[in-house]
Amino acid sequence: MKKGLLFILLAAASVCLPAQEKENAAKSYRVETNRFGANWFISGGVGAQMYFGDNDGKADFGKRLAPALDIAVGKWFTPGIGLRVAYNGLQAKGATPYANGPLVDGGQYSNGYYKEKWNVMNFHGDVMLNLSNMLCGYNEDRVYSFIPYVGAGFVHTGKGPGYDELGINAGLINRFRLSSALDLNVELRGLLMKGAFGNSGPEGLAGLTVGVTYKFKKRGWDAVPTVPMVPESQLNDMRDRVNALKGENESLKRDLVEARNKKPEVIVKKEAGFIPRYVVVFNIGKSNISKREYMNIEAMAKGIKATDKVFTVTGYADKGTGSAEYNMKLSKKRAEAVRDLMVNEFGVPASQLKVDYKGGVGNMFYDDAKLSRVAIVEE
């Protein structure tokens, strides 16, 4: 009867899972891996456990139930994979045909077998798999999680001769979210041993406990930032600007050749025409300059060297990504990267370039956050 009730409870929880997942599907997302100090937890539970051995069928079901205590400490390394170290135990009960058996606790069953009772301790490490997060995506508001685990450990009893044995552990944690810090757990577990308590064949313990888990800070996971694709129309616009700068580059080359070929007695003041501002676009969170920008920066550098004017390199960042402090540092790095490339690679005098930076800003061009991750060179 009790086994049937347990089966019904677990089946009901699994049936509720698809409906809940449909309701919260829009909230599921991929996450970034946290630091080692995040997502630690401690849990405890109480319940009952039952021993299985050579003579486990010689006592009634209720007579074989013994109190159980679970304590565990662990960490989730990803939303789907975690490790824990745990203690399971308290008591176990059994039956033996030997009146002087080492675990006999006094008393005799009606069938002539003698009652056994002893304290048992199982220390083990487990690998846990949160299949709800692995199959349906991480959702910090998910009410129910399906978490099987497997592990190995050391089993000890201090009664009689004192038995020590290695054991294999496996089980299922039915986790119900109570709050961001607390979960309710219904755990079904099993332990398999070989001759641990004086029997000749395989032995085991099966248990069912109910308890709570406290999750230490930092708890939960951050979503992976979504990087939008650049529309083809904007790529075409940038290609047109590149081609226009190539034309200006050729024009500047011709002007420089003509200036060099003029007679020495003619004093020529180095003065170029209007030099449009130039925008260097960066990838999200980066300050390194891609090779595709080099030809345009070279053209701008030649135009600047052809004048006596001072230009300003101003860095920007997208305020929708990162903190204000981080964006201020990133915008400065972007401006310095363009300035350094012009000075060190293309020979622009450092006196002709100033650096400024604005930190995180709103959408600067075409209502597109990606085009706020820039450095702008202008007079």
Image (cartoon, rainbow, N blue to C red):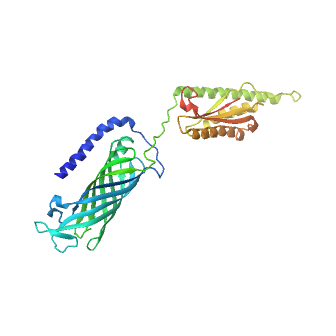
Q: Residue at x 47, y 48 (%)?
A: 34
Q: Is residue 154 above or below residue 239?
A: below
Q: In this view, does 266 lie above or below 136?
A: above
Q: Residue furthest right?
A: 265
Q: Where is residue 30 in the image (x, y as percent from the top left)?
A: 43, 41
Quadrant hosting residue 177: top left
Image side of residue 246 versus residue 121, left or right: right
Q: Position of residue 226 (x, y in %)?
A: 48, 36
Q: Position of residue 50 (x, y in %)?
A: 22, 60
Q: Which of 89 and 266 is in front in this view?
A: 89
Quadrant hosting residue 170: bottom left
Q: Residue at x 56, y 26 (%)?
A: 236
Q: Nearer the viewer, residue 207 or 78?
A: 207
Q: In this view, does 95 lie above or below 42?
A: below
- The quadrant the C terminus occupies is top right
Quadrant hosting residue 318: top right
From this viewpoint, is residue 323 visible? yes
Q: Nearer the viewer, residue 227 or 23?
A: 23
Count of numbered circles on the image: 0
From this viewpoint, is residue 288 visible? no
Q: Position of residue 307 (x, y in %)?
A: 76, 30
Image side of residue 245 versus residue 147, left or right: right
Image side of residue 331 versus residue 52, left or right: right
